[in-house]
């Protein structure tokens, strides 16, 4: 899988979120509630969609599929943009990310994450950082189509460094 290391700028996102776990995945419910309303967000920056996960600190230290996290369906907006009722904003902090290009149906995405966490990360010279993870769903994204393409952003820092 192709990847690059990128230092991204901070961004303001607007959208909807839900608490869920891997065992009780509610991603489809979240996106079904967001997509009909996304055009209500005025001044969206571009047409890319963000599927973003905010994990509690230490989430992957002793992984459990029952542990909950917050998942967002969002778009980028200018910093001081008003958002529609029923939606919220969040600040995506700047930082270093390993960016992977995933090609294939969304239903096979778990295989990409397994590769990233069990093969790439241990040999990369990087460690996970405590910032949001996200997938950037651009113009080549076609949901469950085998020709679909998206970018997976994994927050990293050089191995052996702390977040402080």
Image (cartoon, rainbow, N blue to C red):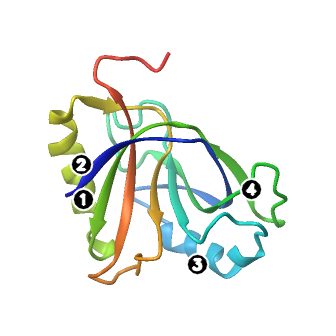
Graded by Cα atoms within 10 Å as few (under 14), some (14 to 19) or many (20 or more), the crowding at tag 4 reads some
The image's mark for residue 136 is none
CA–CA distance between discs 4 and 1? 29 Å
- Disc nearest the viewer among 3 and 1: 1
Q: Circle 4 is placed at which residue position?
A: 88
Dots 2 and 1: beta carbons under 8 Å? yes
**What residue is pinned by disc 2?**
116
Judged by depth in the image, the label closer to the viewer, 3 or 4, is 4
Mark earlier in primary sequence (3, 4): 3
Q: Nearer the viewer, residue 119 or 10?
A: 10
- Judging by the rendered image, the residue that carries numbered circle 3 is 32
Q: Residue at left 26%, top 74%? A: 104
Image coordinates of residue 121 in percent, x first then y, are: 22, 38
Of pointers 3 and 2, the one earlier in the residue sequence? 3
Which residue is labeled 1 in the image?
112
Q: Secondary structure at mark 1?
A: helix
Taking depth in this image into account, of 88 and 77 the one nearest to the observer is 77
Q: Is residue 142 above or below residue 65?
A: below
Q: Earlier in the sequence, mark 2 or mark 4?
A: 4
Residue 106 placement (x, y as % from top left): 34, 73
């Amino acid at each position: 899988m192709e990847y690059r290391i990128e230092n991204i700028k901070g961004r303001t996102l607007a959208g909807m979120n839900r608490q869920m776990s891997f065992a009780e995945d509610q991603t489809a419910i979240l996106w079904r509630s967001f997509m009909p309303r996304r055009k209500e967000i005025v001044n969206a920056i571009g047409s890319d969609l963000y599927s973003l996960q905010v994990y509690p600190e230490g989430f992957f230290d002793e992984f459990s599929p029952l542990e909950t996290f917050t998942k967002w369906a969002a778009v980028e907006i200018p910093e001081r943009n008003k958002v529609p009722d029923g939606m919220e904003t969040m600040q995506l902090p700047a930082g270093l990310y390993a960016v992977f290009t995933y090609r294939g149906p969304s239903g096979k995405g778990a295989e990409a994450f397994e590769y990233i966490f069990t093969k790439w990360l241990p040999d990369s010279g990087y460690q996970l950082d405590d910032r949001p993870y996200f997938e950037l769903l651009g113009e080549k994204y076609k949901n469950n189509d085998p020709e679909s393409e998206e970018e997976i952003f994994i927050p990293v820092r050089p191995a052996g460094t702390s977040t402080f």
